[in-house]
Image (spheres, rainbow, N blue to C red):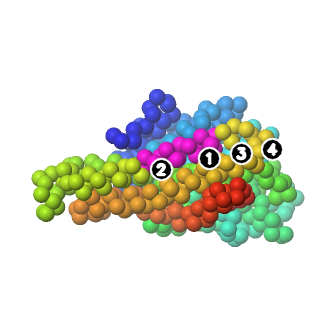
Amino acid sequence: MPFETDVDDALLAKATELRRTFHLDAIERDKQGGRPVEQIRLLKESGLPSAQIAREYNGQGASWLTILRIVREFAKTDGSLAHLFGYHHLPLNLILFRGSVAQKEKWLTGSAAGNWIWSNSGNAMSKTSAGEKTPTGWLINGSRPFSSGSHIADYIQISWENADGARLTAAVPADREGIVIENDWDGIGQRQTGSGTVRFVNLQVHDDELISSPDVPLTPYSSLTSLLQQSVLLNVFVGSAQGILEEGRSYATANSRPWIYSGVERHVDDPWIKRQYGDLYIRTLAATELADKAARSLGAAYAQGPSLSAADRGAAAIDIATANVYAGEVGLAVSSEVFEVMGARSATNANGFDRFWRNVRTHTLHNPAEYKKRSVGTWLLTGEFPVPAMYR
């Protein structure tokens, strides 16, 4: 196969085994949507949710290169599970970046021991939940959209605005009274991510569950959360391109028929088909190489810890933005153009090949390439790095 996983990495080998299991019913689950309960059980049993947690908290200390390659591996067949696994790391590392010593010990050690799955319901662009201060914490009411993973999580990172409009964040158990999962996600893609609405109905949050404070300034290190998010997305795009190209190749060699005017007896002997598959492979390989480069840049920045400089953070941001833009464009192109060289019979619901395009299309809309290209162009022309913020 053209995009084989490095199974010398034990964690990637586990991910490959899981991906093969996920593949067995990926098409049917994509149609059904809802909760991938059995798949999350298998994921937790594999120990992969604790892979990236540092060894000092009894995790496995895996590199970002390994974690993001696992995201990519899952996306070869199931973009939803790739998304859920990748986004699980965002609140985990928010605790590492901004949590207190006691919070890190409690939540990171607990997560490593239980292979907890984390999610978030704190969309910063939707100020639709509010909190009232109480003697021991906060009382939260309202809702938050795009709460990916909340439907299968053990812990949820939530956000709300106080009376002054400042955004506060906390980590709470997903089964706490007052958390209502609406199960209203109806996207055309990423159908099992549960990226819908979470309502808060007199939800009690304790003071020791607050993560940092809005008064604490953002540092290059604590701002890495946005780069983690972008890294997850770009690897969903790349894995989707790899997956549809591999499935398209298998379909073309076994099922596609030559066009009546091609002059060949086998579909794969048509020079047009050969050239088109070659082009799709080259673009996907280039996106894969950029993704690995970006993952290594992220890992190098992350390893510096709180001493990370603005310049080193900026350099990683440029690598990740570059990879993200190209991965999105390639993911969309490959998952669409491959139908032209598989043929008309490939475009059936039974084959389920359309899930790859729908997954990439859904995610890229949340992450406009135009603004990343401008960031990269600004850096190229002026040397200025993007100011750390959401999506950059």
Image depth: mark 2 or mark 4 in front: 2
**Residue furthest front in the image:** 381
Q: Relative to 18, is 142 on the left or the right? A: right
Q: Is residue 270 magenta?
A: no
Local crowd size for mark 3, using a 10 Å CA cut-off: few (<14), some (14–19), many (≥20): some
State the residue position of label 1.
Answer: 89
Q: Residue at x 67, y 69 (%)?
A: 126
Q: Amino acid at mark 1?
A: His
Main secondary structure along the magenta-highlighted residues:
helix
Residue 154 tag number: none
**At numbered mark 3, what does the secondary structure look like: helix, strand or loop?**
helix
Residue 131 can be seen in this image: no
Q: Relative to 145, is 236 on the left or the right? A: left
* Mark nearer the N terminus (1 vs 3): 1
State the residue position of label 4.
Answer: 100
* Mark nearer the N terminus (1 vs 4): 1
Magenta span covers which residues?
284-299
Image depth: mark 2 or mark 1 in front: 2
Q: Amino acid at mark 3?
A: Asp
* Mark nearer the N terminus (2 vs 4): 4
State the residue position of label 2.
Answer: 287
Quadrant of the rendering where the N terminus is positioned: top left
Q: Nearer the viewer, residue 229 or 34?
A: 229
Q: Nearer the viewer, residue 367 or 56?
A: 367
Q: Is residue 288 magenta?
A: yes
* Mark nearer the N terminus (3 vs 4): 4
The location of residue 169, given as percent across then percent down, is 75, 57
Q: Nearer the viewer, residue 293 or 229?
A: 293
* Mark nearer the N terminus (3 vs 2): 2
Q: Amino acid at mark 2?
A: Ala
The location of residue 56, given as percent across then percent down, is 71, 31
